Image (spheres, rainbow, N blue to C red):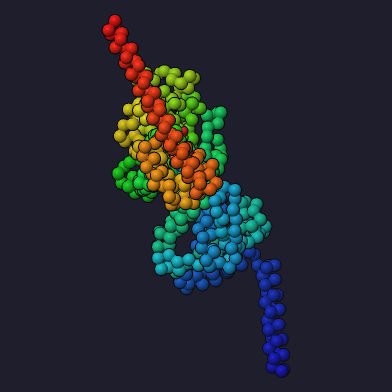
Amino acid sequence: MSNYKSVLSAVASLAASAMLIRSITNEFIPYEVIDFFNSGLHNLCRKFSTQLTVVIEEFQGISRNQVFEAAEAYLGTKATLSAQRVKASKSENDKNLSFGVDRGDEVNDEFEGVRLRWKFVCRQAESSPRRHHDMNASLRSEIRYYVVSFPKKHKQKIFGSYLPYVMERAKAIKQENAAVKLHTIDYGGYWKVPGVTFSHPMTFETLAIDAELKREVVNDLNRFVKGKEFYKRTGKAWKRGYLLYGPPGTGKSSLIAAMAYHLNYDIYDLDLTAARDNNELKNLILSMSNRSILVIEDIDCTINLHNREEDGEAVTNGDNKVTLSGLLNIIDGLWSCCGEERIIVFTTNHKERLDPALLRPGRMDMHIHLSYCNFSAFEQLTFNYHGISQHKLFQQIEGLLREVQVTPAEIAGELIKISDTREGLEDIVKFMHNKKMLLAKTQIDQNNIEDHEFGEEKSRDKI
Ligand SMILES: Nc1ncnc2c1ncn2[C@@H]1O[C@H](COP(=O)(O)OP(=O)(O)OP(=O)(O)O)[C@@H](O)[C@H]1O
Ligand SMILES: [Mg+2]
């Protein structure tokens, strides 16, 4: 017992002496000297450690450190796997929930066999005289940084491959989570900032076009986004042009929406009549962001695209001085030398009305014909609207679709009226029969008119 007491009193007196020494040193020994001893001890420990620790501070001067931002996004995806506490958040412009590491928490990661340990550190900013030289730190109430530790011998791999990988992954995570934005032109001739969240309901899953054509388009887009190396190797600008043509209501605008969602690219909807002249058009193109789709709808209507030779100085569309040569210069010149990962889409109901210069091979990489509804598109529509993929009337409808030209928009319009598909599909058959009869009648009328005119001509000849 006495032994126990003496041990206790020895510990107490040791602690008291330590406190005393500490307060004396704090009072009388300058900070610089304490720092010197502390860092000496620290350096000694570091020399013998096999681990290397990298500190990633939140700020770099007044701007945010991009490595810190990347770590924040990247670790969010890891946090749900190994952290004790996870932060969840979502802003209006995000599609999904984002997760983050909570203060003081640790996350494990592994890269090509190397184990890494991340920690998110937050501490109160000191207002001690020692920190006054650091104006930013003294203005902030909290200092935040990540530390990542890993075996020293893998330094090269971590700096050369892992950290760049974290940056790349973070970029992709942010892009995946950002909602698609639609940009239109304001009165001053600039893109409205910020764009509005694009919420068209169409995706490639719901788009009803020929199944083979759909596959072709999706594959083409996938090749394009993965083509960074290809475009670099071949010296081609990382751009792609699509011309969508076909009658009204066949899904041209719907296809653009599906493309934007598939790629997660913003849409820049360029109304050529809203741009005052070629110069304004140039500025608009220059101020677009990468990973975006420039859309020019109804190109045959918004600009007089004929008479290329004349349009150099001509006022082609009322007061609008945007010309075909201006547009072509942009596609060939500016468009191809600024920015990357960009898509341009033209739509028209009348491909035959476009100037051949616009259709020249190499100008628009892919011409996509959106046509009347075929059976594969019909099946997709009935599935979208009523969740059915089989029906006794399908065979009859398949036959009718070969004879009658109906647009997907018309079929969609009929399907939406139906409440009970068993009965309702009869109405669609009726609708197509009516169209067929109308078509036959117009054909007969047309023939009668032609016969009549021919008859009149003949009798004139006789006279
Ligand atoms: N291929 C399709 N798949 C699914 N729905 C379609 C399709 N085509 C048309 N629709 C329906 O019809 C509506 C109009 O289609 P959309 O605006 O895409 O046609 P468009 O070809 O752009 O016509 P326009 O030439 O008049 O601009 C869409 O909102 C959609 O509901
Ligand atoms: Mg359209």
Residue 276 in the image: above or below residue 179: above
Seen in the image, is 201 located left or right of residue 370? right
> Going 49% across and 26% down the picture, which residue do you hit?
273
Q: Give percent across and percent down for residue 417.
A: 54, 42
Residue 327 in the image: above or below residue 344: above
- The foreground one among 282 and 456 is 456
Q: Give percent across and percent down for residue 24.
A: 69, 71
Q: Residue furthest left?
A: 462
- The foreground one among 177 and 336 is 177
> Going 51% across and 60% down the picture, which residue do you hit?
77
Quadrant housing residue 454: top left
Number of marks in the image? Answer: 0
Q: Give percent across and percent down for residue 192.
A: 55, 35
Q: Determine if residue 307 is in view.
A: no
Q: Determine if residue 11 is in view.
A: yes
> Going 47% across and 47% down the picture, which residue do you hit?
382
- The foreground one among 25 and 65 is 65
What quarter of the picture does the C terminus occupy?
top left
Q: Give percent across and percent down for residue 3.
A: 69, 93
Residue 194 in the image: above or below residue 121: above
> Going 48% across and 22% down the picture, which residue do you hit?
320
- The foreground one among 205 and 70 is 205
